[in-house]
Image (cartoon, rainbow, N blue to C red):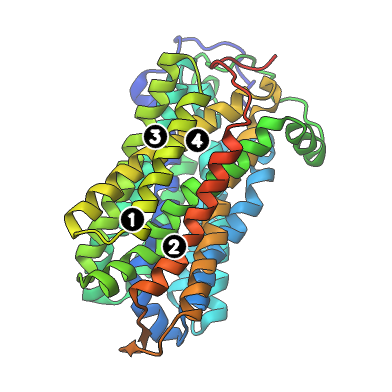
Amino acid sequence: MATELTSGVRGYPPAALAWSVWGLGALLYLIGFYQRVAPAVMTDRLMNDFTIGAAALGNLSAFYFYSYVAMQIPTGIIADRWGPRRLLTAGAGVAAIGTAIFAWSPDLWWASAGRLLIGASVAVAFVSMLKLATRWFAPRQFALASGLALLFGVVGGVIAGVPLRMLVESFGWRPVMAVSAALTALLCAMIWWRVRDDPSQSGYDSHALSAHSGAQHGSILHGVAEVLSYRNTWILLITPIGIAGAVLTFAGLWGVPYLRQVHGLDTKMAAAITSSLLIAWAFGGPILGSLSERTGRRKPIYVATTLAALFGWAVIIFIPLPLWLLVVTLVFTGFVSGNLIIGFAFAKESVPARLMGTASGVCNMGPLLGGMLLQPAVGWILDRNWLGVTTAGARIYDAAAYQAGFSLMFGCIVLSLCLILFAKETHCRQTA
């Protein structure tokens, strides 16, 4: 228990220890992001192996999001009751099992079951990392930890780009996923060995406001109902569906085949370009979050960057661009889409402190809802516009089909922009 020692004997934990504890949780988040976007560089192999089209592939990829989203609400409360150590250990263990099932799946049903387990298990990483950050870091470092969390995730996304494609071409996607399962199992053991819920368990003082802050809990439904009674919660839950959902849909599944089939690039080059979108997204998060902190306001920057993201996707989707300008526009759009970090802080501040964990879980559903809804929806539109062309068992779609599919992303961001205009400013201060 975090309260076994009410006061540490050596002051606050050294930075190296604090970051190593937090970092193991961040590695599970990295693996989760890697699994989230891995199908993007395996679309041709998965279509061929399971004999499926774009709609079925989008659904297979989205099974990750179905369970991930469902886990967001209970994860915050489970983290309070179990503690990050046990929750992260269980998450890594189940993720290893799910990845192994996916690697050896004989058919689409088993592959979907594996993706479902992976999504449910890695869903615990983000909230657990935030929980660790509130205890192992000073309050002023919370925004930095949140921004670095996204950076860790995007590193996983980059690994799932060119490096993963090269491994898949050399060894096949199934052996690569099997090795991924083994590495995740190793992380499970490391988390149990190294992570502690609170510095007091290692003889240090805790940065938590109160050692007993999580001792009493209402029901999950009561906590969620109370969080949803705040207008900002709804706005900050729905807004990222379009903004982050577009990034996850493009970089996480359909961007690579689009660049291959419309722009004639090979898979590795296409993966490198989608990775550049993710890298810009990672850098945008902490930079925009820091800018928001400096100005003392959340809403103006969130509105401006959402408008910029809408402009970027409009250019990408509706205007024929030379490749170099397409890449520049994708990087710009990815950077401004990093405003979801502002959204996380915005949501946390919009409710009383005792509801921060639940609010974080609820609002973290937004970006993943975007991937869950848009990936299969874009695939469905692609199949409706398919002209019957195939290569090596995988369907080929033309520019008009992709434009029709990606228009869904554009429409969702329009909705995001309209909603965020109605958010109530917190001025970077916690609601009483």
Q: How far is the residue under mark 1 from the one under mark 4?
A: 34 Å
**Residue 23, x across and y down, in percent:** 39, 36
Picture layout, residue 81 above or below residue 260: above
Q: From the image, which quarter does the N terminus lie in?
A: top right
Q: Residue under label 3, please give it.
A: 285
At label 3, the amino acid type is Gly
Residue pictured at 40% horizontal, 32% vertical = 147
**Residue 300, x across and y down, in percent:** 48, 24
Q: How many marks?
A: 4
Answer with mark 2 or mark 4, whichever residue precedes in sequence: 4
Under circle 1, the secondary element is helix
Residue pictured at 34% horizontal, 28% vertical = 287
Answer with mark 1 or mark 4, whichever residue precedes in sequence: 4
Q: Residue under label 4, please give it.
A: 129
Q: Are marks 1 and 2 in contact (CB under 8 Å)?
A: yes
Quadrant of residue 162 in the image? bottom left
**Residue 389, x across and y down, in percent:** 35, 89
Q: Residue under label 1, please give it.
A: 316
Pick the residue in front: 118 or 268: 268
